[in-house]
Amino acid sequence: MTGTHIIGDWGTSRLRLFRISDGHIVARRDGPGIGKVGQGAEQALAETIAPLMADGAPDEIALCGMIGARDIWVEAPYADCPATMDDWRAAAVRFDWRGVPLSIMAGLACVGSDRIADVMRDEETQIFGAFRLHPQLGQGRRLIVLPGTHNKWVLVEDGRILSFRTMPTGELFALLRDQSVLGPKDMSGDAVQQQAGFTEGLARAGDGRLLASLFAARSMRLRAGRSSDWAAGYLSGLLIGCEVREAMALLPAEQDVTLIGDGRLSDLYGQALGAMGVVSRRLDGEVCALAGLGFVETE
């Protein structure tokens, strides 16, 4: 990546902007996510990007993520799967913003074999970035998992994204934790207790009875002396364990699974996959997103 560019990953929870000059990150700014700014996205961008523009306008600005969603600012379309990186890039929306060329990257859409439609925005950037960073991922048929609020289980083959399925496990966990009687409200942050609960939740998930096992997050606190931290870990382990079993039945792995995303969350999914005897490797989501937008760190 030669010249000067500003690239950004703008999701529901946060905005990350990077100024790139001759192949190096020279500055970074973080800002509010789309979930907080809504239709005030353009103003939020202007405020967050201003310090990165102080040394002069870039040659181009490129943004991926929820910024391209409908009714936010400028809608970017969905490219249909199967899709290559070239297909995805060709579907981007490009326009002039305050004298600078700006691109909003497209999302991807697919229809599963069960005729369920699905969409993604942002995760495709990370996947195509992973192909650039690790060319072997673009060879043969593979399963890539991107843990988050709405987890994506993605089948890829020879550099194309074939299809995917969204599992809203992170959102369900947050709802149960924060807005139901199952969720503990007085956690102390005891990592040992959380891990113990997570391990037990994974074991319960192996029984295949999600609804029958959920209430234990409350009853085991009331009657078996379990802590609030244990209960939070239990909910997480139960939900993730059930998700992994359901998703693996829908999209069976060929040999192993690549996890792309936050390190801590990827570790939890790695544990759940390992409990099923599935080997996983982990890649950093931010690094992959930057590569998908055209930046690869140079020495």
Image (cartoon, rainbow, N blue to C red):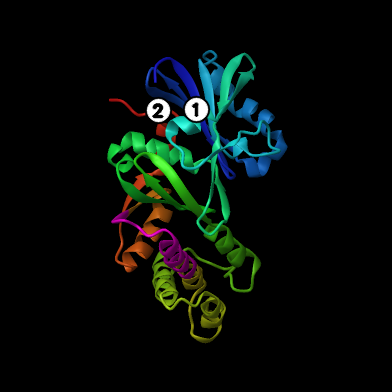
Position of residue 89 relative to residue 223, above or below, is: above
User: Picture coordinates of residue 74 (x, y %)?
Assistant: 66, 30
The numbered mark at residue 94 is none
- In front here: 29 or 102? 102
User: Picture coordinates of residue 133 (x, y %)?
Assistant: 32, 35
The numbered mark at residue 295 is 2
Say whether disc 2 or disc 1 marks the residue closer to the N-terminus.
Answer: 1
State whether residue 287 appears in this view. Answer: no
**Secondary structure category for the residue under label 2:** loop
The image quarter containing residue 45 is top right
Q: Name the residue: 55% across, 63% down.
A: 173
- In front here: 41 or 160? 160
Over which residues does the magenta segment extend?
238-256
User: Picture coordinates of residue 95 (x, y %)?
Assistant: 62, 20
For the C terminus, the image quarter is: top left
Is the stretch drawn in magenta largely helix, strand or loop?
A: helix
Image marks 2 and 1: residues in contact by CB distance under 8 Å? yes
- What is the spatial separation of the Cα atoms under label 2 and label 1, in whole angstroms? 9 Å
Position of residue 61 relative to residue 249, above or below, is: above
The image quarter containing residue 284 is top left
Q: Is residue 251 magenta?
A: yes
Amino acid type indicated by mark 2: Phe
Residue position for label 1:
7
